[in-house]
Amino acid sequence: MFLRRSGGGLVPVAVGEHKAKAKLKDEKAQLRAAEQVLFAAAGLGVRIAVTTDGAKCRYVDVEASLAKGEIIHFAEKRDLNPAVLENLIAGDAAVAKNPRALAETVWQIIWHATKEEPKLCLLTFVEIFVLKFLSDNLPSTTFPEAYRFYTLLEGQDVFKKRHGKTEIAYYVATIRPFIKQLFPDNVISEDPQLAELFGLKTIVSKTSVINGFAFLKSSTETIDNFNRVFLQILDAFQKMACDRTSWRQ
């Protein structure tokens, strides 16, 4: 069961049914699992039901299924995460959001904390934006849970006990190198049409998708000293993406 914190309480919003791969091996088994989770979802009065074997998720539209008398799935293929649930509830999976207000807020937070150049402050915003985007859109087989945005939102005490370090230290030591490994520097484009377009023999991407983090450079502050500010930035991203909601499973 997935719960949404609202008004100081927890409200159920979705139900999931996790099956072994053998239990979802054919259409008949998948239908049986969908009917099972639909029954539970209808009993709780939630609109979203999920079946998964740990590798693939299928999302049942509970209202549409009950109205039509057959299983109706949402057109959603991403792995389950808080952003996907939020999109399904709001019906805005394909709706673009303007990040300008978020960028301005985060830029100011970073500048006040570091007094770095505007370019580096903006690059830091882009870096966290990339982390959130990859976490919401890449499958867990490519981008495991340990490296995702939501791992950093466990709560400071729980996080420190589990990982032995602060969130910002974990990001710098573990998550950031993993993203750079996925998108390394100095990658040569293998598309001949791209080289032809620019009149060059080869095209080389000199940088990774992340290329600037203001909290790495300081002569008087350690990384841990910036943890409160880092958490403030993560919270700003979460508020924009999930409309001030928090999730528990």
Image (tube, rainbow, N blue to C red):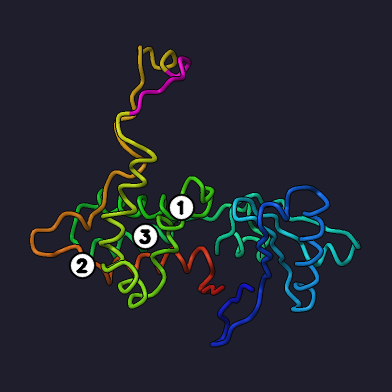
**Residue 87 in the image: x percent, y percent?**
62, 60
The residue at the far right in this view is 69
Query: Where, quadrant-wise, is the N terminus in this rendering?
Result: bottom right
Tell me the residue at 77%/54% (across/down): 30
Under tag 2, what secondary structure? Answer: helix
Stretch in magenta: 187-194
At a point 83% along the width and 63% down the height, the residue shown is: 64
Question: Which comes before the other along the chain, label 2 or label 1?
Answer: 1
Q: Which residue is mark 3?
A: 104
Mark 2 surroundings: few (<14), some (14-19) or many (≥20) residues within 10 A: some
Secondary structure state at the residue bearing disc 1: loop
182 shown above or below 149: above
- Mark 2 → mark 1, Cα distance in angstroms: 24 Å
Taking depth in this image into account, of 193 and 152 the one nearest to the observer is 152
Task: For label 3, count other residues whose C-alpha is less than 10 Å away and answer few (under 14), some (14-19) or many (20+).
Answer: few
**What amino acid is found at the position of numbered circle 3 in the picture?**
Glu
Badge 1 crowding class, 10 Å Cα cut-off, few under 14, some 14 to 19, many 20 or more, is: few
Q: Which one is nearer the viewer's eye here, 119 or 233? A: 233
Determine which residue is flagged by label 1.
144
Mark toward the viewer: 3 or 2: 2
Where residue 182 appears, as percent x and y from the top left, is 39, 40
Q: Report the residue at 76% width, 73% height from top.
A: 40
Q: CA distance from mark 3 to mark 1?
A: 30 Å
Which amino acid is tagged 1? Pro
